Image: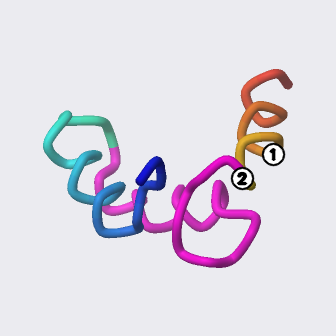
């Protein structure tokens, strides 16, 4: 469907072995600017801006 749910994000973070897995829910909330609990194209401008800083 092109979106990433909070559950998918948290699970993927742990599976990939990224640091600080306990913070994955906080990272998701920071990225999900359209507070619909899904990361999708509506959130991309904000996400891209974070990484361009």
Label 1 sits on a secondary structure element that is helix
Location of residue 47 by image quarter: top right
Q: Is residue 16 above or below residue 31?
A: above
Q: Is residue 49 above or below residue 4?
A: above
Within 10 angstroms of label 1, few (less than 14), some, or many (20 or more) residues? some
Percent from the top left, x then y, of residue 38?
52, 66
Location of residue 44 by image quarter: top right
Give the residue displayed 77% in from the left and 36% down from the top: 50
Give the residue displayed 52% in from the left and 60% down from the top: 28
Label 2 sits on a secondary structure element that is loop
Check contact, mark 1 vs mark 2: CB within 8 A: yes
Q: Tell me the colour scheme of the image.
A: rainbow
Q: Is residue 35 magenta?
A: yes
Q: Is residue 32 left or right of residue 48?
A: left
In this orientation, which residue lies closer to the viewer: 44 or 18? 44
Label 1 belongs to which residue?
A: 46
Within 10 angstroms of label 2, few (less than 14), some, or many (20 or more) residues? some
In this orientation, which residue lies closer to the viewer: 34 or 23? 34
Percent from the top left, x then y, of residue 20?
34, 48
Magenta residue span? 20-41
Label placed on residue 43: 2
**From this viewpoint, which residue is outermost toward the top?**
52
């Amino acid at each position: 469907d092109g979106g990433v749910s909070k559950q998918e994000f948290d699970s993927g973070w742990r599976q990939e072995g990224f640091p600080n897995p306990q913070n994955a829910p906080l990272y998701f909330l920071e990225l999900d600017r359209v507070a619909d609990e899904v990361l999708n194209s509506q959130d991309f401008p904000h996400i891209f801006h974070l990484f361009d800083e």
